[in-house]
Image (spheres, rainbow, N blue to C red):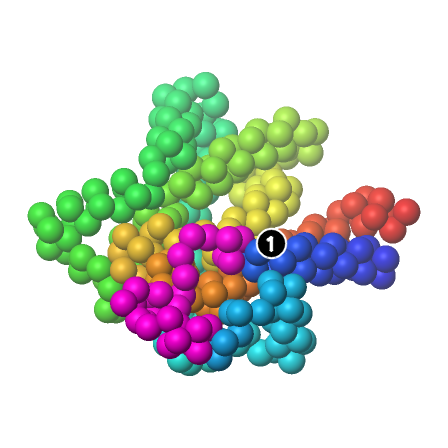
Amino acid sequence: MGAFLISRLLSALVVMLGVVCLVFLLIHLVPGDPVDVMLGESARPADREALRTRLGLDQPMAIQLGHYFKGLAVLDLGVSLHAKQPVAELLAARIPATLELALAAISCALLIAIPLGIVAAVKRGGAWDWGAMGFSMLGVSIPNFWLGPMLILCFSLWLGWTPVSGREGTASLILPAVTLGTAFAAILARMVRSSLLEVLGEDFVRTARAKGVDEPRVIWRHAMRNAWLPVVTLLGLQFGALLGGAVVTEVVFDWPGIGSLMIEAIQTRDYPLVQGCVLFISLAYLLVNTLTDILYGLIDPRIRDGAGA
Protein backbone atom coordinates (compact mmCIF):
# COMPACT_ATOMS: atom_id res chain seq x y z
CA MET A 1 0.00 0.00 0.00
CA GLY A 2 2.89 2.36 0.79
CA ALA A 3 4.44 1.88 -2.64
CA PHE A 4 1.08 2.56 -4.26
CA LEU A 5 0.63 5.86 -2.37
CA ILE A 6 4.19 6.98 -3.07
CA SER A 7 3.88 6.24 -6.80
CA ARG A 8 0.64 8.23 -7.07
CA LEU A 9 2.01 11.21 -5.11
CA LEU A 10 5.24 11.28 -7.12
CA SER A 11 3.28 11.16 -10.37
CA ALA A 12 1.14 14.09 -9.22
CA LEU A 13 4.26 16.08 -8.26
CA VAL A 14 5.92 15.50 -11.63
CA VAL A 15 2.78 16.55 -13.49
CA MET A 16 2.47 19.69 -11.35
CA LEU A 17 6.07 20.72 -12.04
CA GLY A 18 5.54 20.16 -15.75
CA VAL A 19 2.37 22.26 -15.71
CA VAL A 20 4.11 25.14 -13.92
CA CYS A 21 6.99 25.18 -16.41
CA LEU A 22 4.73 24.89 -19.44
CA VAL A 23 2.38 27.65 -18.31
CA PHE A 24 5.30 29.93 -17.43
CA LEU A 25 6.81 29.54 -20.89
CA LEU A 26 3.53 29.82 -22.79
CA ILE A 27 2.33 32.95 -20.98
CA HIS A 28 5.63 34.67 -21.80
CA LEU A 29 5.30 33.70 -25.46
CA VAL A 30 1.78 35.13 -25.80
CA PRO A 31 1.82 38.34 -27.87
CA GLY A 32 1.47 41.48 -25.80
CA ASP A 33 3.45 43.26 -23.13
CA PRO A 34 2.16 43.88 -19.58
CA VAL A 35 4.16 47.10 -19.49
CA ASP A 36 2.17 48.44 -22.45
CA VAL A 37 -1.07 47.48 -20.69
CA MET A 38 -0.04 49.18 -17.44
CA LEU A 39 1.49 52.37 -18.88
CA GLY A 40 -0.15 52.61 -22.28
CA GLU A 41 1.57 52.62 -25.65
CA SER A 42 2.25 56.37 -25.42
CA ALA A 43 4.53 56.01 -22.36
CA ARG A 44 8.11 57.20 -22.64
CA PRO A 45 10.76 54.53 -23.34
CA ALA A 46 12.59 55.42 -20.11
CA ASP A 47 9.48 54.85 -18.03
CA ARG A 48 8.81 51.59 -19.82
CA GLU A 49 12.31 50.30 -19.17
CA ALA A 50 12.22 51.41 -15.54
CA LEU A 51 8.96 49.55 -14.93
CA ARG A 52 10.23 46.49 -16.79
CA THR A 53 13.33 46.44 -14.58
CA ARG A 54 11.29 46.93 -11.39
CA LEU A 55 9.02 44.00 -12.31
CA GLY A 56 11.96 41.81 -13.25
CA LEU A 57 10.74 41.35 -16.82
CA ASP A 58 14.11 42.39 -18.26
CA GLN A 59 15.76 39.23 -16.96
CA PRO A 60 16.08 36.00 -18.99
CA MET A 61 13.13 33.62 -18.69
CA ALA A 62 15.29 30.98 -17.00
CA ILE A 63 16.11 33.39 -14.17
CA GLN A 64 12.46 34.49 -13.90
CA LEU A 65 11.41 30.84 -13.71
CA GLY A 66 13.99 30.22 -10.98
CA HIS A 67 12.64 33.15 -8.96
CA TYR A 68 9.11 31.83 -9.42
CA PHE A 69 10.08 28.38 -8.11
CA LYS A 70 11.83 29.97 -5.13
CA GLY A 71 8.60 31.79 -4.33
CA LEU A 72 6.56 28.60 -4.68
CA ALA A 73 8.90 26.89 -2.20
CA VAL A 74 7.73 29.34 0.48
CA LEU A 75 4.12 29.42 -0.80
CA ASP A 76 4.63 32.89 -2.33
CA LEU A 77 2.74 33.17 -5.64
CA GLY A 78 3.94 36.70 -6.29
CA VAL A 79 2.12 40.01 -6.63
CA SER A 80 -0.43 40.85 -9.31
CA LEU A 81 1.00 43.30 -11.85
CA HIS A 82 -2.41 44.90 -12.41
CA ALA A 83 -4.14 44.78 -8.99
CA LYS A 84 -0.92 45.30 -6.97
CA GLN A 85 -2.14 42.67 -4.48
CA PRO A 86 -0.70 39.28 -3.53
CA VAL A 87 -1.89 36.60 -5.94
CA ALA A 88 -2.74 34.31 -3.02
CA GLU A 89 -5.21 36.88 -1.65
CA LEU A 90 -6.90 37.32 -5.02
CA LEU A 91 -7.25 33.55 -5.40
CA ALA A 92 -8.57 33.13 -1.85
CA ALA A 93 -11.29 35.69 -2.57
CA ARG A 94 -12.46 33.79 -5.68
CA ILE A 95 -12.11 30.15 -4.61
CA PRO A 96 -15.38 30.01 -2.58
CA ALA A 97 -17.44 31.08 -5.62
CA THR A 98 -15.84 28.44 -7.87
CA LEU A 99 -16.26 25.74 -5.22
CA GLU A 100 -19.89 26.72 -4.71
CA LEU A 101 -20.58 26.53 -8.44
CA ALA A 102 -18.82 23.17 -8.80
CA LEU A 103 -20.77 21.62 -5.90
CA ALA A 104 -24.07 22.98 -7.24
CA ALA A 105 -23.29 21.71 -10.75
CA ILE A 106 -22.39 18.21 -9.59
CA SER A 107 -25.51 18.09 -7.39
CA CYS A 108 -27.62 19.08 -10.38
CA ALA A 109 -25.92 16.43 -12.49
CA LEU A 110 -26.61 13.73 -9.89
CA LEU A 111 -30.28 14.67 -9.61
CA ILE A 112 -30.64 14.33 -13.38
CA ALA A 113 -28.28 11.48 -14.21
CA ILE A 114 -28.99 8.83 -11.58
CA PRO A 115 -32.76 8.51 -12.24
CA LEU A 116 -32.19 8.66 -16.01
CA GLY A 117 -29.43 6.06 -15.93
CA ILE A 118 -31.42 3.68 -13.74
CA VAL A 119 -34.59 4.00 -15.83
CA ALA A 120 -32.60 3.52 -19.05
CA ALA A 121 -31.00 0.34 -17.68
CA VAL A 122 -34.21 -1.14 -16.26
CA LYS A 123 -36.19 -0.28 -19.42
CA ARG A 124 -33.41 -1.28 -21.78
CA GLY A 125 -34.40 -1.07 -25.44
CA GLY A 126 -37.67 0.72 -24.69
CA ALA A 127 -38.87 4.29 -25.11
CA TRP A 128 -37.44 5.35 -21.75
CA ASP A 129 -34.03 4.02 -22.72
CA TRP A 130 -34.06 5.82 -26.07
CA GLY A 131 -35.28 9.02 -24.44
CA ALA A 132 -32.64 8.97 -21.70
CA MET A 133 -29.81 8.26 -24.12
CA GLY A 134 -31.18 10.90 -26.50
CA PHE A 135 -30.98 13.44 -23.69
CA SER A 136 -27.47 12.23 -22.98
CA MET A 137 -26.36 12.85 -26.56
CA LEU A 138 -28.07 16.24 -26.55
CA GLY A 139 -26.39 17.26 -23.30
CA VAL A 140 -22.94 16.35 -24.59
CA SER A 141 -23.52 18.09 -27.93
CA ILE A 142 -24.75 21.48 -26.64
CA PRO A 143 -21.83 23.77 -25.71
CA ASN A 144 -21.95 25.88 -22.57
CA PHE A 145 -21.38 29.13 -24.44
CA TRP A 146 -24.68 28.55 -26.29
CA LEU A 147 -26.75 26.95 -23.54
CA GLY A 148 -25.90 29.65 -21.00
CA PRO A 149 -27.18 32.61 -23.06
CA MET A 150 -30.29 30.63 -24.05
CA LEU A 151 -31.13 29.98 -20.39
CA ILE A 152 -30.54 33.65 -19.59
CA LEU A 153 -32.80 34.69 -22.46
CA CYS A 154 -35.59 32.34 -21.37
CA PHE A 155 -35.56 32.36 -17.57
CA SER A 156 -34.02 35.77 -16.84
CA LEU A 157 -35.19 38.11 -19.61
CA TRP A 158 -38.51 36.55 -20.68
CA LEU A 159 -39.76 35.00 -17.43
CA GLY A 160 -37.80 37.10 -14.94
CA TRP A 161 -37.31 34.18 -12.54
CA THR A 162 -33.55 34.47 -12.03
CA PRO A 163 -30.90 37.23 -12.11
CA VAL A 164 -29.14 37.73 -15.43
CA SER A 165 -25.65 37.47 -13.97
CA GLY A 166 -23.56 37.90 -10.86
CA ARG A 167 -23.54 36.13 -7.52
CA GLU A 168 -26.55 37.43 -5.64
CA GLY A 169 -28.00 34.61 -3.58
CA THR A 170 -29.32 31.17 -4.42
CA ALA A 171 -31.38 32.30 -7.41
CA SER A 172 -28.28 33.49 -9.26
CA LEU A 173 -26.68 30.04 -8.82
CA ILE A 174 -29.43 28.07 -10.59
CA LEU A 175 -28.67 28.87 -14.23
CA PRO A 176 -24.85 28.52 -14.00
CA ALA A 177 -25.25 25.21 -12.15
CA VAL A 178 -27.68 23.88 -14.76
CA THR A 179 -25.46 25.05 -17.61
CA LEU A 180 -22.35 23.43 -16.14
CA GLY A 181 -24.09 20.34 -14.79
CA THR A 182 -26.05 19.36 -17.91
CA ALA A 183 -23.07 18.10 -19.90
CA PHE A 184 -21.79 16.18 -16.88
CA ALA A 185 -25.26 14.72 -16.28
CA ALA A 186 -25.27 13.39 -19.83
CA ILE A 187 -21.95 11.62 -19.33
CA LEU A 188 -22.89 10.35 -15.88
CA ALA A 189 -26.25 8.99 -17.04
CA ARG A 190 -24.52 6.83 -19.63
CA MET A 191 -22.07 5.57 -17.02
CA VAL A 192 -24.87 4.69 -14.57
CA ARG A 193 -26.75 2.86 -17.32
CA SER A 194 -23.68 0.93 -18.50
CA SER A 195 -22.54 -0.01 -15.01
CA LEU A 196 -26.02 -1.04 -13.88
CA LEU A 197 -26.62 -3.16 -16.98
CA GLU A 198 -23.42 -5.05 -16.29
CA VAL A 199 -24.42 -5.74 -12.68
CA LEU A 200 -28.00 -6.73 -13.55
CA GLY A 201 -26.64 -9.70 -15.47
CA GLU A 202 -24.77 -11.11 -12.46
CA ASP A 203 -25.81 -14.30 -10.65
CA PHE A 204 -26.52 -12.61 -7.30
CA VAL A 205 -29.15 -10.37 -8.95
CA ARG A 206 -30.88 -13.35 -10.52
CA THR A 207 -30.74 -15.14 -7.17
CA ALA A 208 -32.36 -12.18 -5.38
CA ARG A 209 -35.15 -12.09 -7.96
CA ALA A 210 -35.63 -15.87 -7.68
CA LYS A 211 -36.06 -15.48 -3.90
CA GLY A 212 -38.96 -13.10 -4.52
CA VAL A 213 -37.22 -9.83 -3.61
CA ASP A 214 -39.23 -6.92 -5.03
CA GLU A 215 -37.70 -5.11 -8.03
CA PRO A 216 -36.99 -1.70 -6.37
CA ARG A 217 -35.05 -3.46 -3.62
CA VAL A 218 -33.14 -5.53 -6.17
CA ILE A 219 -32.16 -2.35 -8.04
CA TRP A 220 -31.23 -0.15 -5.09
CA ARG A 221 -29.92 -2.59 -2.46
CA HIS A 222 -28.26 -5.22 -4.61
CA ALA A 223 -27.49 -3.87 -8.08
CA MET A 224 -26.68 -0.20 -7.41
CA ARG A 225 -24.45 -0.98 -4.43
CA ASN A 226 -22.20 -2.96 -6.78
CA ALA A 227 -22.51 -0.52 -9.68
CA TRP A 228 -21.28 2.51 -7.73
CA LEU A 229 -17.52 1.97 -8.13
CA PRO A 230 -17.10 3.24 -11.73
CA VAL A 231 -19.71 5.93 -11.06
CA VAL A 232 -17.83 7.21 -8.01
CA THR A 233 -14.60 7.20 -10.02
CA LEU A 234 -16.20 9.32 -12.73
CA LEU A 235 -17.61 11.66 -10.08
CA GLY A 236 -14.15 12.24 -8.65
CA LEU A 237 -12.58 12.86 -12.04
CA GLN A 238 -15.34 15.20 -13.19
CA PHE A 239 -15.42 17.15 -9.93
CA GLY A 240 -11.77 18.01 -10.45
CA ALA A 241 -12.59 19.10 -13.98
CA LEU A 242 -15.54 21.19 -12.76
CA LEU A 243 -13.30 23.07 -10.32
CA GLY A 244 -11.11 24.25 -13.15
CA GLY A 245 -13.22 23.90 -16.25
CA ALA A 246 -15.96 26.39 -15.45
CA VAL A 247 -14.20 29.24 -17.27
CA VAL A 248 -16.79 29.65 -20.03
CA THR A 249 -19.74 29.38 -17.65
CA GLU A 250 -18.25 31.88 -15.22
CA VAL A 251 -17.63 34.38 -18.03
CA VAL A 252 -21.13 33.96 -19.49
CA PHE A 253 -22.83 34.51 -16.13
CA ASP A 254 -20.25 36.98 -14.77
CA TRP A 255 -19.66 34.58 -11.89
CA PRO A 256 -16.78 35.85 -9.70
CA GLY A 257 -14.74 32.66 -9.65
CA ILE A 258 -11.26 31.51 -10.61
CA GLY A 259 -12.20 31.10 -14.28
CA SER A 260 -13.32 34.69 -14.77
CA LEU A 261 -10.31 35.90 -12.79
CA MET A 262 -7.99 34.02 -15.13
CA ILE A 263 -9.62 35.57 -18.21
CA GLU A 264 -9.18 39.04 -16.70
CA ALA A 265 -5.53 38.25 -15.96
CA ILE A 266 -4.91 37.05 -19.52
CA GLN A 267 -6.45 40.20 -20.97
CA THR A 268 -4.17 42.41 -18.86
CA ARG A 269 -1.09 40.19 -19.40
CA ASP A 270 -0.83 39.76 -15.63
CA TYR A 271 1.77 36.97 -15.62
CA PRO A 272 1.84 36.16 -11.88
CA LEU A 273 -1.96 36.07 -11.64
CA VAL A 274 -2.35 33.85 -14.72
CA GLN A 275 0.25 31.47 -13.35
CA GLY A 276 -1.48 31.45 -9.96
CA CYS A 277 -4.88 30.69 -11.51
CA VAL A 278 -3.54 27.88 -13.67
CA LEU A 279 -1.57 26.52 -10.73
CA PHE A 280 -4.73 26.38 -8.59
CA ILE A 281 -6.76 24.76 -11.37
CA SER A 282 -4.05 22.17 -12.00
CA LEU A 283 -3.56 21.50 -8.30
CA ALA A 284 -7.30 21.09 -7.71
CA TYR A 285 -7.63 18.71 -10.65
CA LEU A 286 -4.57 16.70 -9.63
CA LEU A 287 -5.61 16.56 -5.98
CA VAL A 288 -9.11 15.27 -6.72
CA ASN A 289 -7.81 12.80 -9.31
CA THR A 290 -5.09 11.52 -6.97
CA LEU A 291 -7.55 11.10 -4.09
CA THR A 292 -9.93 9.27 -6.44
CA ASP A 293 -7.11 7.04 -7.62
CA ILE A 294 -6.10 6.25 -4.04
CA LEU A 295 -9.72 5.58 -3.06
CA TYR A 296 -10.12 3.28 -6.04
CA GLY A 297 -7.00 1.42 -4.92
CA LEU A 298 -8.37 1.07 -1.40
CA ILE A 299 -11.63 -0.34 -2.72
CA ASP A 300 -10.06 -2.65 -5.32
CA PRO A 301 -6.89 -4.35 -3.98
CA ARG A 302 -5.94 -5.55 -7.47
CA ILE A 303 -5.05 -2.00 -8.51
CA ARG A 304 -2.71 -1.20 -5.59
CA ASP A 305 -1.14 -4.67 -5.76
CA GLY A 306 -0.38 -4.11 -9.42
CA ALA A 307 1.15 -0.70 -8.64
CA GLY A 308 3.21 -2.11 -5.80
CA ALA A 309 4.52 -4.90 -8.02
Above or below, 273 relative to 105:
below
Image label count: 1
**What segment carries the magenta color?**
26-52
Above or below, 74 relative to 158:
below
| Position of residue 199 measured from the top left corner of the image (x, y, whole percent) | 63, 33
194 left or right, relative to 34: right
Res. 261 visible in picture: no
Res. 180 visible in picture: yes
| Position of residue 121 measured from the top left corner of the image (x, y, whole percent) | 50, 29
Q: Amino acid at mark 1?
A: Leu
Mark 1 = which residue? 22
Above or below, 245 relative to 68:
above
Residue 38 in magenta stretch: yes
Residue 270, image quadrant: bottom left
Camera-side residue: 89 or 249? 89
Residue that lies at the very extreme toward the right in this rendered image: 309
| Position of residue 187 measured from the top left corner of the image (x, y, whole percent) | 47, 37
13 left or right, relative to 301: left
Which residue is found at the position 70% from the left and 29% from the top?
203
Which residue is found at the position 51% from the left and 69% from the top?
57
Crowding near the residue tagged with mark 1, few <14, some 14–19, many ≥20 C-alpha atoms within 10 Å = few
109 left or right, relative to 287: left
Camera-side residue: 159 or 87? 87
280 left or right, relative to 35: right
Camera-side residue: 116 or 255? 255
| Position of residue 194 measured from the top left corner of the image (x, y, whole percent) | 56, 31
Residue 125 in magenta stretch: no
Residue 298, image quadrant: bottom right
Q: Tag 1, which secondary structure?
A: helix
* Quadrant into which the N terminus falls: bottom right
- Magenta stretch: helix, strand or loop mostly: helix
